[in-house]
Each structure stands twice: as C-alpha cells, then as structure tokens.
Image (spheres, rainbow, N blue to C red):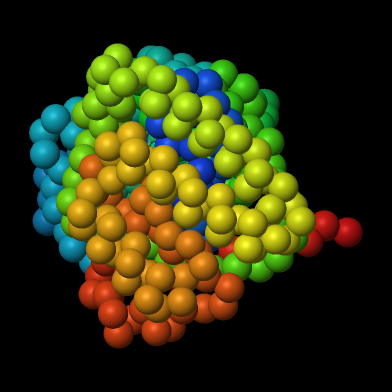
Amino acid sequence: MNFLTQSNLTAYASGKAILIGEHSVVYGHKAVAIALPDVKLKLTFFAPDHSQNISSWDNAWFTKIRGNSFIPEQRVTQLLTKAFEKALTLCGVDSSLQYYIPQKFLIESDIPLGGGMGGSAAISTCLLKIANQIFNLNNETKAGLNFQQQIQFANEIDCLFHFGKASGLDASTVASNGIIEFSKGKLPEYIQNKKEFWLALVDSKERGETAHMVKKVAEKLNTIPEQMQNALIQLGVLAEKSILALTAGDLKLLANCLNTAQNYLCEMGVSTEKIDTIIQKFKDTGALAAKLTGAGGGGMVLGLFESKPDVLYSHFDKDSLFITRVPQYVEKS
Ligand SMILES: Nc1ncnc2c1ncn2[C@@H]1O[C@H](COP(=O)(O)OP(=O)(O)O)[C@@H](O)[C@H]1O
Ligand SMILES: C[C@@](O)(CCOP(=O)(O)O)CC(=O)O
C-alpha cells in the first residue's frame, strides 16, 4: 500500500491520425496510421495525500483541452474511472489495493474531443502506464509490459469508450507511438518513413460520432453492397500502396493514395460539405493531398505538405489547426 504516500505520477501519450483505412479496417482491410509527435496528452495521477490539497475541484477527474478547463460529464467520468480500474487489473495490481484509491486525475490534452485524433486511446495508454507504475511501486519484483501487452491492454481499455466496438486501430497506433500498418486482430508493424513530410489537421467543428458513422457504413453496405465492397477493397489496396510510398519516400505516390482514399470515403457517405470546403482550402494553400481522418461525418481534416505550411495560420483559426512534422526514420546505432 506504499503508493498511497508516494508522490504524484504522470504519463504522456500522443494523439493519432489515420492516413488510410478508416472504416475499411473494420471489415478486415489493412490501415495505415500515425501517432502525431507534436500532439500530446498528459495524465497526472494525484496520490491521495496530494489530492486532499486540491480544493478547487472535488470530482475525481478534471480535463484541460488546449487551455479550456472542464469537468467531464458524469457518463464520461464513470467511463474514465472504469478505465482506470481496468488498467489496474490488467497490470496485475492487487484488487485489495484498489479500495484505497480516493485519488484525483488531471488530463491536460492537445487533442480535440471526439474528432478522430484518438483522445480516448491516449487516455487508455496513459492509464496503462500509470497502473504499471503503481504495480512497480507495490511489488519487489518490477514488471514492464511487453509490446503485445501494451497494444492489447490499451485496446481493451479504449473499447470501454467505444462500447466494445473499436477495431483496435486507434489504441494500436497510440500505444505503438510511430507510423504503423494495422489489420484487425493482428499486432501492428512499424513503417520506416524514408522522407520527412508535414501534416496539418483542421477541426471541422462538426461531429459524426464513431459508432454512428460505423453503423451508417454498415447500412449502406446492405443497400448498395457491390459499390461499397469495391470501395472497401480499394481502400485496402491504397493502404498497401501508401506503405510502399512511405518506405520509398515517394510523396507524390503517397499524396495520390490519400486523395483517392478521400474519393472512396465520399462515395461511402462519410464526408460532409464542410470537410470538402476544408479540403479545397488545403489544396489552394499548397497541400499535396487532403482527406478526412477518423470516422468522418465531421471531425478532423488532414492535409499532406512537403514543407512546413506556415501559410495555414492565416487561413484557419489557430485553435482548430495542428501542424506537425513527420520525421524521416533514422536507424538507431
Ligand atoms: N480529454 C478528455 N477528457 C475526457 N474524456 C475524453 C477526453 N478525450 C476523449 N475522451 C472520451 O473519449 C471519447 C472519444 O473521444 P476521442 O477518442 O477523442 O474520439 P475519436 O474516437 O473520434 O478519436 C469521448 O467522447 C470522451 O468520452
Ligand atoms: C471508423 C474507424 O475505422 C476509425 C475510428 O475513427 P475515430 O478515431 O474513432 O474517429 C472505426 C474503427 O476502426 O473502429
């Protein structure tokens, strides 16, 4: 029980963007996604000794997203607490200890809520890291999680936020913390990016909700099966092509894959007029490609650029714009 008197614990994780494969990944096709190096979520666990001093909030959970503070609604708070308990159990923390935890949590995040940038996957990954630290504080024999456990456990926790229905792509990407190829039910594999590029993400400020959009695709698959099956298969082919493009440093090919993927996503009914407008704005400002990222129906729009697109600061509201560099992979010596 010595963690009750230990100092506070912190963990970090990145947000994510799907390059190719939203929706098609649900049907077993390959997807490619990236943990965004400059988009972070920090989770602080205030041990009970310290949390008593935080008089300004009496809830267990407190969130700050890009400087805006709020207490999550009760439904979300319950999910967060359930997620922490699950993380403790998965990390092997003795359940008798869990009764002694009237602690508080602070989430400080760059990641907009529900926009397809993997906020819940980042929370899940951080909770896992914190639960593992708690295990180590309470056990003589220290334990780390291996790669497979990190991925599987992060996904199990993230499923709580997605009502058990996530393909595993979000959590696998965030827990891997790199550029990955992913197929449902398999461990992700890292992709070694040959040439630096830049990604910009703009928040459409509309929200489609993942579960709703996944259902919408399923319904359309029933009404126009041939067209939808073809789109899903083609997205899988584009994912494979984009892996080749990344490993060869062929930005032109990568751009072509992203633009074509957007056409299929439109055909599948998950894009919106607002997304189309942002895509056009991206193209007007020099993007090699642009597409929605995540479940669609709103959420974030992704632009691919060869160099840092500073010009975007004068076209988009600063609060809804992210610009991040994707470095070239360099083998560690
Ligand atoms: N910073 C946060 N604070 C509290 N809850 C969050 C936060 N980020 C995500 N969540 C929870 O996770 C759910 C899914 O959000 P998110 O993972 O950002 O969406 P997406 O799956 O589109 O990437 C939210 O509806 C909320 O319940
Ligand atoms: C639509 C989907 O393929 C991607 C998830 O997108 P989002 O990050 O939850 O918006 C759903 C899934 O993979 O479970």
Q: Quadrant of ligand 2?
A: top left
Indicate whether 72 appears above or below 184.
below
The image position of residue 111, as x and y in percent, is 33, 55
Q: Residue at the location (48% across, 62% down)?
A: 289
Q: How many marks?
A: 0
Indicate whether 329 appears above or below 143.
below
Q: Is residue 82 left or right of residue 144?
A: left
The image position of residue 49, as x and y in percent, is 30, 45
Q: Nearer the viewer, residue 222 or 297?
A: 222
Q: Residue at the location (53% across, 28% down)?
A: 233
What is the quadrant of residue 73 in the picture? top left
Q: Image quadrant for the C terminus?
A: bottom right
- Inspect this view and state whether residue 80 appears: no
Q: Nearer the viewer, residue 139 or 170?
A: 170
Q: Image quadrant for the N terminus?
A: top left
The image position of residue 325, as x and y in percent, is 55, 68
